[in-house]
Each structure stands twice: as C-alpha cells, then as structure tokens.
Image: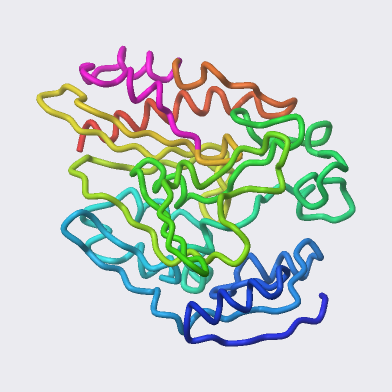
Amino acid sequence: MQPFSYTKVTSQEVAIAIKEEDETAAFIAGGTDLLGLMKDGVRVANTLIDINSLPIADIELKSNGIRIGAISRMSDVAFHPQVKQCYPVISQALLQSASPQLRNMATVAGNLLQRVRCGYFRDPVFPCNKRIPGIGCAAITGHNRMHAIFGASEHCIAIHPSDLAVALTALDAVVCIQGAEKIRRISIHDFYLLPGETPEKETLLEPGELIVAIEIPDFAYKSDYLKVRDRASYEFALVSVAIALEIEADIIKSARIAFGGVAPKPWRGWEVEEFLKGKAINPTTFAAAAELAIKEAEPQTHNEFKIELVKRILIRALSVVAEK
C-alpha cells in the first residue's frame, strides 16, 4: 500500500480546497471501499481527507420529502423510523447491502460512489479501461457471469454494485453536490454515466466536488426492494429491482421501477413504467411488463440467465407490492 498523508477537516470549504490542490487526494468517512482499493493498488491517494466532522450527517424529514446527509451511516438510515415508514424500499435496499459491521461504518455517499466489483478492475494484473483507459476490457472475453446485459459498451461491461442507488433511482432522488463556488442538484439518474467510450468516468462529480446530501421527494406509493443473489447475505446482486406503485381500485395509476445488477448504472424501466399506467393488476399485465423489461437486453457469454431473472423478479415485485 502506497504511503499517504492524513488530515481531518471541520469545514467543507477546507476539504474542497485541499482536494482541488491535490487531484489524487480522496475524501474518507467510512472508508469501507476506498481502503480496499488502495490496498489492492487500484486507487492511489497521496492524501486522505477525513470528513467525519463535517455537519452533513443529519436525516431530516421535510414537508416535500426527506434529506439524508452524505455521511449518514447506512445502518442509521436503514433503521430511521421515518425512512422505514415512508420509504421502505430504501430501508430494504440498505439492509440487503453488505454485513451489519460494514453498514455501521459505511456512509450513504460512499455507498453511492463505490467502484465496480468486476474482478478484472480490482486486480491490476488484468487490462481494464476503467483503471487505464485504452488498454482493453478483460471481462468481455473473460468470465462475465456478473456483468451487464444493458447499457454496456465495447470498452466496459461492469455493473454498478450499489443496492441503495437502485432504490434512490426508482424514487427520483436528487444528489446535492458542493463545489468551490456553488451547490449543484443533479437527478440521480443523470448523475451516473454509461461507459460509452469513457468508462473511467462513472459520474458527473467533478474534481474537488463533495456530495453533501441526498434528497428524496415525498410520495404516497407502495414500494419494495427485491434482490436475487448467490447466497443469502453479504453478496452483490445478480439481479435486483426497486419498485414503487400508485394503485387505485386495482388499477396502476403510476409506477417507478429500477433494476440493479444488470447495467453500469441503476437501470430505470421507463418503458415498463409507461406501459403499466392505467393497467389492471393481474398476471397478464405483469407478464407483459416482464417481456417489455428485457426487450433491449444484450447478454454476455456467461450471463444470459439474467434475462429470465429480470422477468421473474419484476413479476414477483409487482405481485408483492400489489398485495400490500
């Protein structure tokens, strides 16, 4: 592990100024992903900027939704009474993420910014366009069971690993970002980027910027998060889905759906949502929605099974939410 310096800050302005002076510097709160990347030689940081003393850890219920501070611990958010009551899909996604020990340390912003779990990215022996642009993607011709069936490119087929990001995408959350001169508010759907020709750039976060909060609008939908994985705990998704439905007299008035484990960013089911509007709750509707959900799927050599999983998990999630 490369030597680094450590500094603890008490203001956002100082934190951002240090980061602007040193592009290799990294903000650290929980450090559950960053330190692993540094130990593996995938991430180099000359300076670690400890932001745990910044006033960005509150969870505030507002008249138009909820605001979650960037360094709120995952476990605190998952068990927060208002989150459990008003946004159960968030609580469920968090409780199905990592282990209790990691959830007690990891922060909301850190979870959203965690790097891909592609084994070829995490092992510097293999070529990876995310680590060094232009040297190739070993996953395309390698073992790609865990990789993308939507939104990939010839330069990268890795999936985004965050369960929380999937839930927040379904809820139209907004990422609040503090820069040296202004605060930006970006839809979480727009915040994440597809790999295209620049897989090394995963988000709209600019050098020196700091995520300070996540804002989720108020909504009266029924919601749920389902996750299919190889084992029951501490495992990343093969396929997951966050779903929220507005139902009236057994008719779906509106729907919000996002999939995880299938794309380089949380994959929003826009066409499925539009199809479900005004449809009756029944197996025929759900089956048709499932077929529409996989219309654009382009599986890799070893992950064609994900197509069937997407269909089955969507039907199951629609059934569960409809029965609430």
Q: Is residue 107 above or below residue 205?
A: below
Q: Which x, y percent locates residue 249?
A: 10, 24
Q: Quadrant of the C terminus?
A: top left
Q: Which x, y percent locates residue 307?
A: 56, 23
Check the image and name the residue furthest to the front. 181
* Residue shown at the point (66%, 24%) measured from the top left: 299
Give the color scheme: rainbow, by chain, secondary structure or one colour: rainbow
**Residues shaded magenta:** 267-291
Q: Which x, y percent locates residue 219?
A: 21, 45
Q: Does the magenta portion include 288? A: yes
Check the image and name the residue furthest to the left. 249
Q: Does the magenta portion include 164? A: no
249 lies left or right of 285: left
Q: Quadrant of the N terminus?
A: bottom right
Most prominent secondary structure in the magenta stretch?
helix
Q: Quadrant of residue 300?
A: top right
Q: Is residue 132 above or below residue 76?
A: above
191 lies left or right of 95: right
94 lies left or right of 228: left
Task: Decide which of 203, 109 is in the foreground and name it.
Answer: 203
Q: Which x, y percent locates residue 73?
A: 43, 70
Q: Is residue 227 above or below residue 282?
A: below
* Residue shown at the point (52%, 28%) measured from the top left: 309
Q: Quadrant of residue 169?
A: top left
* Residue shown at the point (87%, 48%) measured from the top left: 126
Q: Is residue 27 above or below residue 312?
A: below
Q: Quadrant of residue 282?
A: top left
Task: Decide which of 235, 110 is in the foreground and name it.
Answer: 110
**Figure disc tally:** 0
* Residue shown at the point (64%, 55%) measured from the top left: 115
